Image: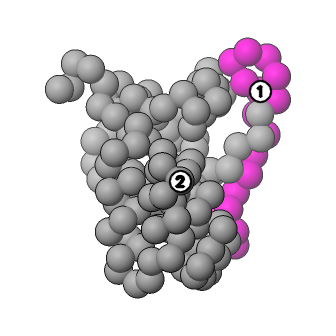
């Protein structure tokens, strides 16, 4: 995620590389793909593109470091929340929900846990989701951080 106010205070030229030195992204999340276009786009480039969007989520096509074109959606923390609320929130809060069941499975829930999650309402949804995310390998610190 690019563009939070705390990142700009750090003054790093290439924040995605700095973040990945602290947090180990799971391979399944990125399909083992590296951060796109690192040779041509640094943190400032991505952040400027993100901030230039007037309406919607900016998308750009750039040449990847491997020489093929990559289509990239550029999101900051606020845009990620807006995107979730626009496209996923209603379906995630609808109960009972096959969509919620599938999300829970993708976060590593056992089928019985996904059944429970798909029936929850209100704050219970977010508490249960938080426990699934914490248990999953969605975000892990690099080994030298621990």
* Image quarter of residue 135: top left
- The CA span between labels 2 and 1 is 41 Å
- Quarter location, residue 31: top right
Could you tell me which residue is drawn at 45 percent across and 77 percent down? 120
Q: Farthest residue in the right direction?
A: 68
Task: Give the SS element for disc 1.
Answer: strand
- Give me the disc on residue 63: 1
Residue 116 visible somewhere in the drawing: yes
Q: Is residue 107 above or below residue 19?
A: below
Mark 1: few, some, or many residues within 10 Å (few <14, many ≥20)? some
Q: Nearer the viewer, residue 32 or 121?
A: 121
Residue ID at (58%, 63%)? 101
Residue 29 on image: x %, y %: 57, 37
> Alpha-carbon neighbours of circle 2 within 10 Å: few (<14), some, or many (≥20)?
few
Q: Quadrant of residue 19?
A: top left
Q: Position of residue 2 (x, y in %)?
A: 48, 48
Magenta span includes 65: yes
Determine contact: label 2, label 1, CB under 8 Å: no
Q: Going by the image, does 101 lie left or right of 21?
A: right
Counting from the top left corner in percent of width and height, residue 40 is at 65, 26
Residue extending furthest left? 146
Label drawn at residue 22: none
* Residue indicated by mark 2: 111
Describe residue 68's horizontal placement relative to residue 14 as left or right.
right
Start-end of magenta stretch: 51-69
Q: Secondary structure at mark 2?
A: helix
């Amino acid at each position: 995620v690019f563009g939070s106010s705390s990142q700009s205070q750090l003054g790093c030229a290439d924040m995605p590389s700095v973040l990945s030195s602290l947090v180990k992204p799971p391979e399944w999340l990125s399909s083992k793909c590296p951060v796109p276009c690192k040779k041509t786009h640094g943190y400032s480039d991505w952040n400027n593109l993100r901030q230039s969007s007037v309406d919607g989520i900016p998308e750009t096509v750039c040449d990847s470091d491997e020489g093929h074109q990559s289509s990239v959606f550029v999101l900051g923390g606020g845009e990620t929340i807006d995107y979730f609320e626009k496209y996923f929130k209603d379906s995630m809060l609808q109960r009972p929900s096959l969509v919620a069941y599938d999300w829970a499975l993708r976060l590593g829930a056992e089928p019985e846990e996904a059944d429970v999650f798909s029936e929850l309402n209100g704050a219970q949804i977010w508490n249960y989701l938080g426990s699934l995310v914490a248990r999953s390998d969605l975000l892990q610190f690099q080994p030298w951080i621990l």
